[in-house]
């Protein structure tokens, strides 16, 4: 941990982000790309699915806006472009849209 002058521990909540305000400050994102591996899911996942993601200490629902490419889990090589759905055992590059303001590292 670290201390900040004039900031009480009671003023800080889960999900707060700190950074250098003068040089490249953190900002919220409209969307982000993520490699998602489906480990155990009973059905098929299509665009529009909105699971709750854990990103550091934030727990935010993010909607699968579009499935961009299905990739091989081990090598990361592209197997299929713009798949209609994914299922258990698949890995995919997905465009995710957070339902609340969210800051993601790039």
Image: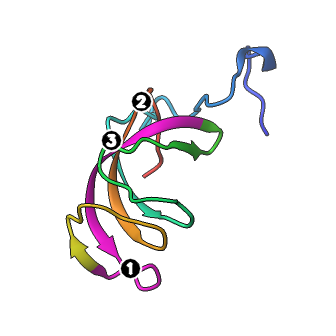
Q: Which residues are magenta?
A: 59-78
Q: In the picture provided, is 16 more to the left or to the right than 32?
A: right
Q: Nearer the viewer, residue 95 or 51?
A: 51
Estimate the x, y position of residue 87 in percent, counting from the top left.
41, 66
Estimate the x, y position of residue 100 in percent, counting from the top left.
44, 26
Q: Quadrant of the N terminus?
A: top right
Q: Earlier in the sequence, mark 1 or mark 3?
A: 3
- Say which residue label 3 marks: 31
Q: In the picture provided, is 34 more to the left or to the right than 6?
A: left
Q: Nearer the viewer, mark 3 or mark 2?
A: 2
Picture colour scheme: rainbow
- Say which residue label 2 marks: 99
Q: Nearer the viewer, residue 55 or 105?
A: 55
Mark identifier at residue 76? 1
Pointer 3 with pointer 2, Cβ within 8 A: no
Q: Is residue 35 above or below residue 30?
A: below
Q: CA distance from mark 1 to mark 2?
A: 28 Å
Q: Earlier in the sequence, mark 3 or mark 2?
A: 3
Q: CA distance from mark 3 to mark 2?
A: 10 Å
Q: Nearer the viewer, residue 31 or 27?
A: 31
- Residue 60 part of the magenta-drawn span: yes
Q: Secondary structure at mark 3?
A: loop
Q: Nearer the viewer, residue 25 or 31?
A: 31
Q: Is residue 7 above or below residue 32?
A: above
Estimate the x, y position of residue 83 in percent, counting from the top left.
24, 65
Q: How many marks?
A: 3
Estimate the x, y position of residue 39 in percent, counting from the top left.
55, 67
Find residue 45 and report its image quarter: bottom left
């Amino acid at each position: 941990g670290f201390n900040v002058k004039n900031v009480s521990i009671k003023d800080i909540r889960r999900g707060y982000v700190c950074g250098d305000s003068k040089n490249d400050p953190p900002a919220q994102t409209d969307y982000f790309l993520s490699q998602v591996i489906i480990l155990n899911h009973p059905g098929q996942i299509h665009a529009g699915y909105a699971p709750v993601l854990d990103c550091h200490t934030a727990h935010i629902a993010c909607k699968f806006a579009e499935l961009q490419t299905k990739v091989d889990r081990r090598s990361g090589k592209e197997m299929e472009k713009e798949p209609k759905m994914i299922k258990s055992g698949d890995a995919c590059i997905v465009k995710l849209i957070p339902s609340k303001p969210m800051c993601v590292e790039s």
